[in-house]
Image (cartoon, grey):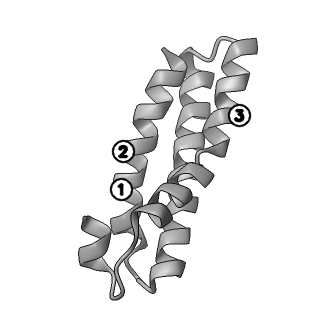
Amino acid sequence: AVLNLMSVHGVSMGCTISVLGYCLLPMVLLCGLSLALRIEGLLGGFLVSAVVGWCSWSASKLFVSSLAMESQQPLVAYPCALLYSVFALLTVF
């Protein structure tokens, strides 16, 4: 709903789901790493922060480029970071 208000053309649900799912790949790699190692503590916090940042930055970059929303990337990255943070919490715990 927020992307539809911010963009000129609007966005479909399929586009939103495909971008968010495509950018979830680093979180899948973090999940695989958490199966082999315990990613708690300082190193785990750094890894989780890096992966959430990577996921949200790439998703916001794709949204901004596909929906012609120049100079609105931080506004798009924040809700993406919240969504990927939930997935990171599920991965760690």
Q: Amino acid at mark 2?
A: Leu
Q: Give the residue number, with chain letter if any, for mark 1.
A: 78
Residue type, numbered disc 1:
Tyr
81, 66: nearer the viewer: 66
Location of residue 27 by image quarter: top right
Q: Return the disc, 2 or 3, that comes first in the chain's sequence.
A: 3
In this rendering, the answer to whether 74 lies above or below 27 is: below
- What residue is rendered at 46% in x and 42% in y? 84
Badge 3 marks a residue whose secondary structure is: helix
Task: Name the spot of residue 78 as percent of width and height, x first.
Answer: 36, 56
Q: Residue 62 or 9: which is nearer the viewer?
A: 9
Q: Secondary structure at mark 1?
A: helix
Name the residue tied to disc 3.
29
- When the figure is inspected, residue 14 is found, relative to residue 82, above or below; the finding is below
Name the mark on residue 82: 2
- In the rendered structure, the answer to whether residue 19 lies left or right of residue 8 reads right
